[in-house]
Image (tube, rainbow, N blue to C red):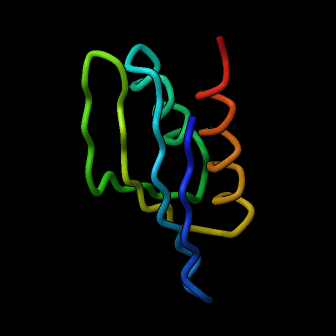
Amino acid sequence: MEVAMRKEARTGSVRIEVTFPAEKAVSGLTGLAKIPGVLFYILRGRVTAREAVYQLELKGRDAGVNEAIWSLRAAASCP
C-alpha cells in the first residue's frame, strides 16, 4: 500500500491517497463506514485489473481520523 497524506491545520480533515491491490479495494474502504464520528469522501478513484487508487478526504475527530488511517493501512497490508 502507498499512502500520501496532507493534513489541513485545525480543520479535522485529512486528504489521503491510498493504493490497494484490486482484490482488496472494497474491503479496504468498508471499515471506514464503521468508525463513529468520521466521514469519508471519495474524491477520485481508479480501479484496474491490478490495483485500485483512491484519493480520500477524511473528516472528524482527530482520534477517529487516526483510527481510519490505521484501518486503511491494516486493510491494505493484510494477506
Name the side, left or right, on which 41 lies relative to 10. left
Q: Residue at x 57, y 67 (%)?
A: 60
Quadrant containing the N terminus in the rendered view: top right
> Residue 52 at what x, y percent from top left?
35, 31
Q: Position of residue 26 (x, y in %)?
A: 40, 25
* Residue 65 placement, left or right of 15: right
* Residue 66 image-quadrant placement: bottom right
Residue occupying the point 61% across, 51% down? 36
Vertical order, 4 against 27 (above or below): below
Indicate whether 3 appears above or below 47.
below
Residue pictured at 59% horizontal, 39% vertical: 72
- Depth check, front residue: 76 or 11: 76
Q: Which is nearer the eye, 18 or 14? A: 18
Q: Is residue 55 left or right of residue 13?
A: left
- Residue, far right: 63
Report the residue at 56% width, 63% height from top. 5
Pinpoint residue 45: horizontal percent, then vertical percent: 27, 43
Q: How many marks?
A: 0
Q: Residue furthest bottom?
A: 10
The image quadrant where one finds the C terminus is: top right
